[in-house]
Image (tube, rainbow, N blue to C red):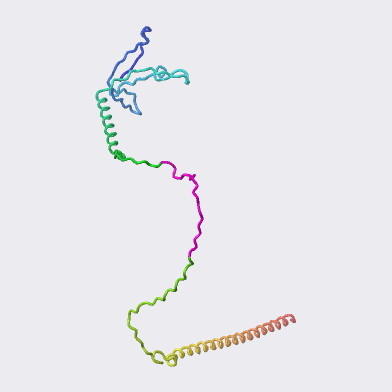
Amino acid sequence: MTSVVLNQEDARASTETYTYRSHPRVVPNRKRYQEHYVNNVQEGPINYGNLMYDRRVVRGNTYAMQLLSWSPEPEPQPAEIKKRHEAHKKMLERKQEKKENEVHAPEMKDVGVRSDVQTELYLEEILDRIIEVDIECQTDAFIKRLPSPVFIPQKTGVDVATQIEEGELFDFDIEVKPMLEVLVGKTLEQALLEVMEEEDLRNLWLHQYAYQELRNAELAEVQRLEENERRHSEEK
């Protein structure tokens, strides 16, 4: 640690400076909250400073250029020098490894054979006019194509004929009887059911009509009796 202090006592040596060095030490950790103000010997004394005399505080206007005083840099320690050399060596090794891992294009070798390459435009204007002559030629008409023969596949088996006489496979008069009996029976059954349903509906309608007539007669009789009762009551 290096510090620079101005000597203010002697006006003659106001521009002179002196330096001193001290070994670095760990900054003591202070307790955040203290119940009692007790000086701890291990922590060291508490030094207070005045910001008005702090050399790090810039004085003057804010738009003028500030000239900071130069302070000599401390000499690096051997351990720090060794550390810097090791870091520089590692950096060089990384650069060399990166350079080796890069993929480069193969170098061009001089084969000794060189050829000219056309680099001008491919489309060129033809200035020399060639003499052209028109000639006609008549071709023959298309000949009609003959029709293709019908394709007949080659036989792959033996042809066998079978004679079936009349009535051997199916006799309509005999085979149709069971089917006809079923159809006629179902038709008659359905017709009988419809007739019975119509008769039931007719009987139900007649019974309903008779009941309605009887009810109307009873209502008329009740009205007649009520009228007689009212008349007798008025006569009394």
* Of residues 50 and 181, the one drawn nearer to the viewer in this rendering: 181
The quadrant in which residue 74 appears is: top left
Residue situated in front as seen by the camera: 95 or 212: 95
Which SS does the magenta portion mostly show?
loop
For the N terminus, the quadrant is top left
Q: Is residue 35 left or right of residue 224?
A: left
Tell me where residue 229 sits by quadrant.
bottom right
Q: Give residue 220's position: percent from left, percent from top.
A: 67, 84
Q: Is residue 185 magenta?
A: no
Of 199 and 82, the residue lying toward us: 82
x%, y% of residue 161?
Answer: 36, 87
Is 76 or 27 nearer to us in this picture? Answer: 76
For the C terminus, which image quadrant? Answer: bottom right
**Vertical comparison of 108 with 58: above or below:** below
3 vs 229, left or right, is left
Q: Is residue 124 magenta?
A: yes
**Residues rendered magenta in the picture:** 119-139
Identify the residue at horizontal 34%, vertical 85% (top origin).
160
Residue 42 location, quadrant? top left
The x and y percentages for residue 169 are 39, 89
Q: Position of residue 202 (x, y in %)?
A: 58, 87
Going by the picture, which residue comes out furthest to the top? 12
Is 152 drawn above or below residue 184 in the view shown?
above
Query: Residue at left 41%, top 90%?
Result: 170
Is 80 left or right of 174, judged from the image as shown? left
Residue 211 to residue 152: above or below: below
